[in-house]
Image: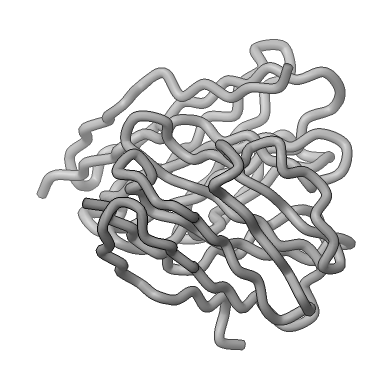
Amino acid sequence: AQSVAQPEDQVNVAEGNPLTVKCTYSVSGNPYLFWYVQYPNRGLQFLLKYITGDNLVKGSYGFEAEFNKSQTSFHLKKPSALVSDSALYFCAVSVYNFNKFYFGSGTKLNVKP
Amino acid sequence: DAGVIQSPRHEVTEMGQEVTLRCKPISGHDYLFWYRQTMMRGLELLIYFNNNVPIDDSGMPEDRFSAKMPNASFSTLKIQPSEPRDSAVYFCASSFGRSTGELFFGEGSRLTVL
């Protein structure tokens, strides 16, 4: 069975500090990994994806994520957090065909001034 | 492009009433997904369509739920009769199958069943 785990319900970080939001996955086959962000009362917005190639992928708003096959992880990172980054972040995985996505439970990121 | 358009944004209804949620996907997208989001269960896939044909409805919770896609630009999710436990935010998303997977979500329909 395919699954995604986001072990932290909430991450708190001070503005200007680096942030990490964790994601691990379990799939049979090659994973295609995604990060989405959800602001209050809005739909999810795509941030970045790993399909193949370079393990470090860069996305919108200065976010990046590193695919680690041995640790089955795809952690989201940003070198310097902004208060406006405060939102709910979802990790998702798809296998084979991009038609079925498995979402994590979400991590609430709080960036304090 | 206007993005994925959902209506209504908010719906408050009484138990037993029929609820119809609507979605207009992005033009040219050939996949359409219906998700439900709750605090308890997170984001759940209910059903998805490819070229207007339902492919996987294994996430539809029970027979009270039904979804249709009569054409490439319109889909509905219907709940009849509605129950308080159906209260959630329902999202529609679309994608272009030949791309590498990015989903485009609508703003959601917040359903409250009293």
User: Where residue B101 sits in the image (x, y, percent)?
Assistant: 75, 53
Residue that lies at the very extreme toward the left in this rendered image: A113
Quadrant in the picture for residue B56 = top right
Q: Would residue A33 be found to the left or right of residue B29 on screen?
A: left
* Residue at the (35%, 22%) spot, across then down: A8
Quadrant in the picture for residue B53 = bottom right
Nearer the observer, A42 or A24: A42
Residue that lies at the very extreme toward the bottom in this rendered image: B1
Q: Is residue B33 above or below residue A71?
A: below
Q: Would residue A7 be found to the left or right of residue A25 on screen?
A: left
* Residue at the (49%, 68%) spot, across then down: B21
Q: Is residue A2 above or below residue B42?
A: above
* Residue at the (38%, 53%) spot, across then down: B89
Total numbered labels placed on residues in the image: 0
User: Where residue B62 sits in the image (x, y, percent)?
Assistant: 57, 38
Residue that lies at the very extreme toward the top in this rendered image: A70
- The colour scheme of the drawn protein is one colour
Q: Is residue B28 above or below residue B56?
A: below
Quadrant in the picture for residue B110 = bottom left
* Residue at the (63%, 43%) spot, across then down: A34
Nearer the observer, A49 or A104: A104
User: Where residue B39 sits in the image (x, y, percent)?
Assistant: 32, 36
User: Where residue A78 sits in the image (x, y, percent)?
Assistant: 42, 43
Figure quadrant of the N terminus of chain A: top right
